[in-house]
Image: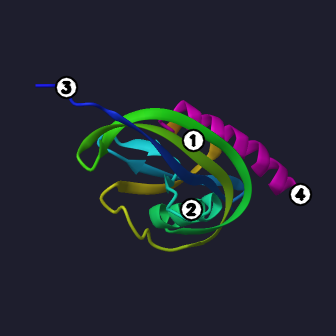
Amino acid sequence: MAPSKVRNMRQVSAGGVVYRERANRVEVALIRVGEMDRWQLPKGIVEADEEREAAALREVREETGVEAELLAPLDTIEYWYYGKRNSTPTRFHKFVHFYLLQYRSSGTPEEDKEEIKEVRWVGLDEAEAMLAFAKEKQVLAMARELIQKHTES
């Protein structure tokens, strides 16, 4: 029996660092996901014919219930991971476009109720300590610089 081949596939996602100011402190929204209860920034797949910026706003709304305004691009991170597509083992080359988003209003998360275990607003230092992935911590550091400039003006 021949070994099954793993195919490669490009995947594009978008998400954001959404922040708000509460009681003289800046907070960002994080989501807790997966079997390992990892804290991450909200993000998801960019749909066909969808702009990355629109996808970032949609994914943040769906995963956190937060309506936000897009302020600026932050960074694009890239990595590889293994998964399945249509039951076929697949090696994904993922690109995630992150944006700085400012909180406007809250609602209820629309989707991913099984995937998203918790949404939490946390201070910037706490968020950095909680994030599971080093590249997302770097995105948060970029966001921190822009947030400081935005809140000082």
Q: Quadrant of residue 111?
A: bottom left
The residue mark sitting in front, 3 or 2, is 3
Residue at the far top in the pictured view: 2
65 sits to left or right of 112: right
The residue mark sitting in front, 4 or 1, is 4
What amino acid type is highlighted by mark number 1? Answer: Glu
User: Which is more N-terminal, label 2 or label 3?
Assistant: 3
| Residue position for label 4 | 153
Between 25 and 85, the residue placed more toward the observer is 85
User: Which is more N-terminal, label 1 or label 4?
Assistant: 1
The N terminus, quarter of image: top left
| Residue position for label 3 | 3
**Residue 19 image point, x, y percent:** 65, 57
Q: Quadrant of residue 110?
A: bottom left
Residue 31 versus residue 57 in the image, above or below: above
Q: What segment is highlighted magenta in the picture?
A: 131-152
| Residue position for label 1 | 126
68 sits to left or right of 147: left
